[in-house]
Image (cartoon, helix red, strand yellow):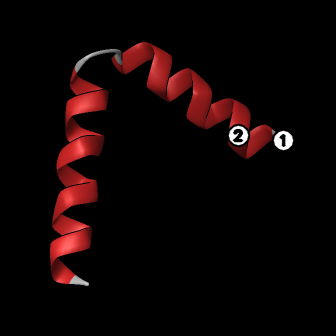
Amino acid sequence: QSNEEARGGREFVLMAGFPPSDLIDECEKTIDE
């Protein structure tokens, strides 16, 4: 579980670092839906 969590966190950080506004926008859309 720890390895999977660490891996997912790293991917999330990488994705967030690439398109921050895009990721936030998608998150908001998902929450809205």
Residue 18 rendering spot, x and y as whole percentages:
26, 16
Return the mark for residue 2. none
The reply, left or right, for residue 28 in relation to residue 32 is: left
* Most foreground residue, 6 or 32: 6
Answer few, some or many: residues within 10 Å of disc 2's Cα (few below 14, many 20 plus, some between 14 and 19): few
Name which residue type carries label 2: Thr
* Most foreground residue, 25 or 14: 14
Q: Secondary structure at mark 2?
A: helix
Q: Quadrant of residue 8?
A: bottom left
Residue located at (70% from left, 40% from top): 30
Residue 32 rendering spot, x and y as whole percentages:
79, 39
For mark 2, what is the residue?
30
Q: Quadrant of residue 20?
A: top left
Q: Quadrant of the N terminus?
A: bottom left
Q: Is residue 13 above or below residue 5?
A: above
Answer few, some or many: residues within 10 Å of disc 1's Cα (few below 14, many 20 plus, some between 14 and 19): few
Label 2, label 1: how many angstroms apart (C-alpha)? 5 Å
* Most foreground residue, 2 or 25: 2
Residue 24 rendering spot, x and y as whole percentages:
49, 27
Q: Quadrant of the C terminus?
A: top right
- Answer whether labels 2 and 1 touch (C-beta < 8 Å): yes
Q: Quadrant of residue 17?
A: top left
Q: Secondary structure at mark 1?
A: loop
Residue located at (35% from left, 15% from top): 19
Residue located at (19% from left, 59% from top): 7
Q: Is residue 13 above or below residue 19?
A: below
The reply, left or right, for residue 22 in relation to residue 19 is: right
Residue located at (20% from left, 32% from top): 14
Return the mark for residue 33. 1
